[in-house]
Image (cartoon, rainbow, N blue to C red):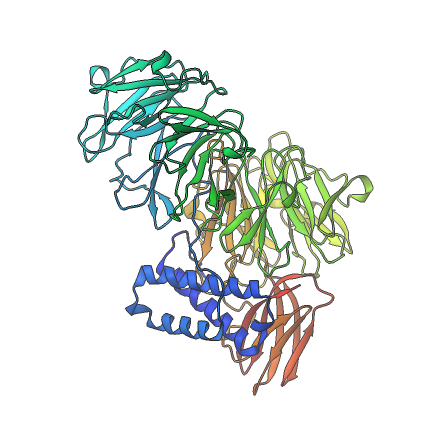
Amino acid sequence: MRKRTFQNQNLLYKYYRKFTNLQKRISLLMRTGEFYELSRDFQNRMIRRLKILYDRLLRLAGKQKLKWATAAMALMFSAFVAHAQFNEPVSLSGFMVNQFANPEFVDFDEDGDMDLIVGDEDGNLKYYMNEGGSFSVDTSSSNIFNGISISDDMAAPTFMDVDNDEDLDLVVGDHSGALNYFENIGTSFENRTGGDNPFNGIDVGAWADPGAADVDLDGDIDLIVWNGSGYLLFYENEAGVFSLTTGVDDPFDGLVFQYAPSLDFVDYDGDGDLDLFVGTYDADIYYLKNNAGNFDVQNGPSNPFNGLDLGWYIHPAVVDIDDDGDLDLAFGDYYGGHLRYMRNDADVFTEKRGTPNPLEKILVPFTAAPAFVDLDEDGDLDMAVGDMYGNVTLFDNTEEGFVPLLDAENPFDAVSVGGYAHPALADVDGDGDPDLVVGDDSGELRYFTNELGDFIELTGTNNPFDGFDGGDLSTPTFADLDGDGDMDLFVGSKYGASDYGKVSYLRNVSGDFQEQLSIDNPFDEIFTSGSIPYRVAPAFSDIDDDGDLDLFLGNKYGNVLMYLNDGGVFTAEEDDNPFFDYYYGLGLLTAPAFADVDEDGDEDLYVGTLNLYQGGNVHFVENTTDPVNSVKQVDSNADILSIYSYQKSIFIDTEDHLLERVELYSLSGEMVLSEALHYQGLYELNMESYQTGLYIVRAYSEGQATVKKVAIK
């Protein structure tokens, strides 16, 4: 077979290819006039995406090597007067850290922007470098935080120059109530204990969370520690000796907050002294304004975070993340162990969850099972993700990456199936919109019909999958395996007394899903021996470009297994499996899905996993192989024909050429239509009888194929 190459890295070639593909797409739309028929918002999005790709290329290759791209950009902007602002999205959302994430911002590398250090429930620290507004974890051997871990858990870091040598030392509170001291010696942090630790002997009871500020305005840095009972303890710095201060000399005397608070000092009101923000167990963030050394609690609208419901165990950091001159909010919480970011726009704080990499920082509770569908009919694929608690969340595909729709904005907000939700979407009832089928831990298939965007559960005989029992932990997916033009259903599961994997096949016969048993199920022999333990999750893609769908299985151990389809017989392949290098590397309970989200003409792999400590992750494995014609070996993307779509039609403009054949494929690789022609001029293919969504069009002329992805709305 033709071996494919997959990679996760953002290489120069990746951006070069995406830039040229998008530039060609926009140029063609402009030539045909279709570009100017698009909404202004959609035009802005396309131009903005091109500008972002150009900026990334510029940083990687330099301006001299990009003269061709600069010229292309000039032509684009001369044909389109863009009104959008071209700003790189700030990426601070869903970092894969453990529960009780405790962030601390400091310009540690002294490059003029704020870097991020995160403590977690296991007592570890992670260092994220800020590079132009994008935060990435430092995994290099030169990372000065390598190896730092405290013996107790719940690491709560803060920085202060303890030894007056003009560098930042590290103080870490822990669950026992102690303070750990790490001296900065230039190339590493050295743990100082006993008499070498100026905080030795301090015991605040539990959940020590320290902060550093010159509270008494005497020119040195004092230490303030919250404890698990909600009290703030003030340790005054007297010539390097930190002494507990109480009574009238304690500016925080009498202040008590909810269990296990966390604190952050910052000059929020810009009056030259440090104010205090306190995160608590019950989702509140309190604002204590510093009035000449007295810290006064601000209530109602005087508190910028009043009324926000943020989760449990809030660990706030108030800092100008996007470098726009005002203070934003970053915070860790209990759920899923991720960091969240709320941007300050004219004193209105709005949560932002976009990421440059579409998938790598998406987290849901404990397990993630992705499925793709263009639910909002905007021409790109959105992502539905099931989690361990039985919920399904829709992630909207935007210029900032995949953004979760929360509460009432999530069309699946009312969907709850008990546990281990695994969604699949297809037009089950034949009314032209995608319906939702969800597998769960019991092995049932729950069916939600799409009624004008509202997903309503049908039960009993109204559920076309009622009575099906494939085992436990059902994992459905749709594919047209028999090539009859409708979507069949395949369900992975954990089955039998020995808990082995199984894939059931429910063939779609005019809307009636009939389970195929024994020799009628092409996957029966794969699982007869019980060689694959625990549950499996199937996905399909034509990996070898031979015109039929091959099988991929996620399993208990973090693998993605491959079975090639040869005339309906599925054979395990290991040597040619492009995902073999990811063996054991993606987490547990892998749930694969294939989709062309980056719109480069080939299907990439998306893998949901279980991670008990980091939340459910979705991993993106890019397909870097050039798309090929799966029917004839001809030159593709010749662009001698012009292809575009409008509403329910596909148009092919032959100009002076002869259109000899047109083929239509779904994104899963199934041939939907093949028609021989002898036509010159503007050919219209009516798509009224086809489902809405994305299709691949191959139009042949003079032995060459023009390939184009189109959206039918």
Q: Is residue 264 above or below residue 67?
A: above
| Side (left or right) of 178 relative to 184 | right
* Image spot of residue 270 (x, y percent): 37, 38
Q: Is residue 63 above or below residue 182?
A: below
* Image spot of residue 638 (x, y percent): 49, 77
Q: Residue at x 36, y 13 (%)?
A: 248
Report if residue 8 is visible in the image: yes
Q: Is residue 681 above or below residue 367?
A: below
* Image spot of residue 120 (x, y percent): 40, 29
186 vs 346, nearest the viewer: 346
| Side (left or right) of 608 relative to 277 | right
Residue 502, image quadrant: top right
Position of the C terminus, as image quadrant, is bottom right
Q: Residue furthest front?
A: 292
Report if residue 636 is visible in the image: no
64 vs 219, nearest the viewer: 219
Q: Residue at x 39, y 28 (%)?
A: 290
128 vs 285, nearest the viewer: 285
